[in-house]
Image (cartoon, rainbow, N blue to C red):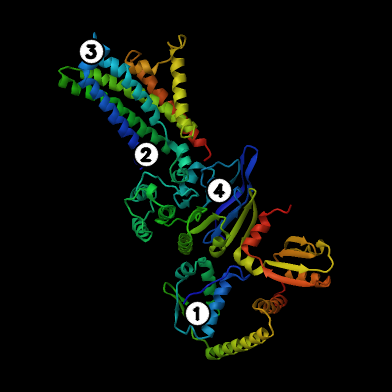
Amino acid sequence: MTFKVNPHLGQPLYLQLMQQIRHAVDTGVLRAGDQLPGIRTLAEEIVVSHNTVAKAYSELQHEEVLELRHGTGAFILPRKGSRARSDKTLQAQARVRALVDMLRQEHFSEEEIRRLFEAELSFAERLASRR
Amino acid sequence: MLFYKAWLESRTRFLLSAITMAALASLFVLMNKDVRADAAPHATYSQYLWLTIYKGYLRDIFVVVALLFGMGGLARERAYGTSGFTLTLPVSRWRLTGARAAVGVAESTIMAFLPAILLPLLSPLVNEVYPWPQALHFGLLWSLGGSFVFTMGFVASALFSGEYSAPIAAVALLFAYSIVADLPRVEQYMIDIHDFMRGTGPQGPLALAAVIATSTMLIAISGFITRRKDF
Amino acid sequence: MDYVIETRDLTKCFGPFRAVSALNLRVAANHVTGFLGRNGAGKSTSIKMLLGMTYPTSGSGTVLGHAITDAKENREMRRKIAYVGEDKQLYAYMTVDQMIRFTASFYPDWSEQAAQRLRRQYQLPPDRKVKALSKGMRTKLALLLALARRPALLILDEPSEGLDPVSIEELLQTLAGVAAEGTAVFFSSHQISEVERIADRVCVLDGGKLAADLSLDELRQDYRRITLGFTTRPPEHVFEVPGVQRIETHGRQVIVIARQNTNEIVQRARGFDAASVDVEPVTLRDLFLATVRHVQ
């Protein structure tokens, strides 16, 4: 399993990594018991600072998504209602797909659609976090 | 390992110079009949050797070579781009200076003793005799004198970093010294290293000590210059 | 926070020219820190002062707790750190093997096993003279000599200069791996794309002064570039809110780069009937250019 982070997204790399791991778990690509590489190995593989990987693993461990076993790496934990969670994600994905198709039919470009989504998300984030 | 590095750096020029000196010294011995007939028909064997080697050509070559042995060092390394590596080794700059100086002095000394060994050794091949004590005495004078000239080159290389500016400065320094040492008023106070090496200057223990002291001082000066330089 | 490098008002003047001016640099242990700056900003000079190659005009500093201006302490410190310089030149007349043996003799914590493993990994022929190595191979040899021990700090000056993309990728991977094993990495570069991938923190040097010192997580999380379009031009000072780094006006467009209070700025813009509001992240390149490119 490998990941790719983008330094230009305006989101810390460790958060991106966490999202990608969570997404993989939610969609069932990563299952309980699967092993993720150790911190050093993953850092070298995706060419990021080990602190990025360490932070991501540490937060996910805190969220009980995975468990760090000293020396061997990280193991995905079974989640309560995990089946329900990945179903929810798949449903959400279907709805977004439908909406995007609709917007495309109305001749919105990919770029415009992306901006519309981002504008909504940024607003919400800002209102919530009071930065 | 600093000695090893200084050796590797200088080994080519040392070997070439040593081979040249040995070859020339040998030639002067082995071809003495012909050369003597042309250049010094009335000289004895010893006198002839003194004229050609200790006073003449070979001495001049030895002086130039000893001077150029002083080239190198951190200033040159900076031009090659290795000074960063050398200076970040966990050794003091004094050790770097000392190692290069020691290897240079050792090399000039070996060169100095080449004729000292070859002359008595090869002379019987042409039915002549050259006394060992005399040869070794000259070996001593040449090794101290050669080391002195070496340290002149060494100081020049600490001051100048150019591929050409360092040797030119070294030669200029040697010239300036030679001229000053020949001035009538200075003659009595200063040892002329050229006379020293020819065996016609002061040779007592005091003279030997003075040459050694001056050479040591020149190395110390180079060490100070290197120590305080920004690289 | 443990600091492996700390300087206090470190200054270097070459005659009237101030190459480094009152530098207060702090580099954290266990992190990868990038050192950015234009050519001639003073990065190399700063690094040379840390390593005892150049003597500061004034100011002080410590590396691993050792005073950089004391010759003996600096030497003691150099035993525990590794440095790969800009030049990446090694002794041309030595072979790879000779360079390894030579360097090993100075460091008590040298691991011959690690050296040979790296030599095989980097595919460096032991009997080849340094002068016959390509630049990429020379860089690898320089890295080998630095990493055959476990230095507490690795300092690199423009490590990717002159390397092809594959070698650069391998270099970055090596740095990530080394950092994961506990070596703090401090490297100067003007390749922003490399720094932004593996660095945790970035220090920007401009005209000999420290112009920025921040964590990349912070940059990505908090810094925003807000592009506002107006039909009539509002006064710039409206947007002078705490946290604003820079305000640029281009006709009826105002661009604000802010470290915080993005909301506040957007509210004020809407208060002035902004025709368009675009909030975007600030990339490291944006920040760097904004920091060092001085407004005419």
Residue type for callout 2 = Glu
Residue C206: percent from left, percent from top: 64, 51
Q: Is residue B103 left or right of residue B85?
A: left
Looking at the image, which residue is at 45% across and 72% down? A38
Which disc is residue A66 wearing?
1
Q: CA distance from mark 2 to mark 3?
A: 42 Å
Towards the viewer: B59 or B30: B30
Mark toward the viewer: 1 or 3? 3
Which disc is residue B37 wearing?
3
Q: Is residue C10 left or right of residue C164?
A: right
Towards the viewer: C66 or A5: A5
- Same subunit, labels 2 and 3: the answer reads yes
Residue type for callout 1 = Leu
Contact between marks 4 and 2 (CB within 8 A): the answer is: no
Residue type for callout 4 = Ser
Which disc is residue C77 wearing?
none
Badge 4 is on which residue?
A: C44
Residue C263: percent from left, percent from top: 75, 71
Residue A57: percent from left, percent from top: 52, 74
Q: Quadrant of residue B133?
A: top left
Q: Report crowding for label 3: few under 14, some 14 to 19, many 20 or more residues within 10 A (C-alpha).
A: few
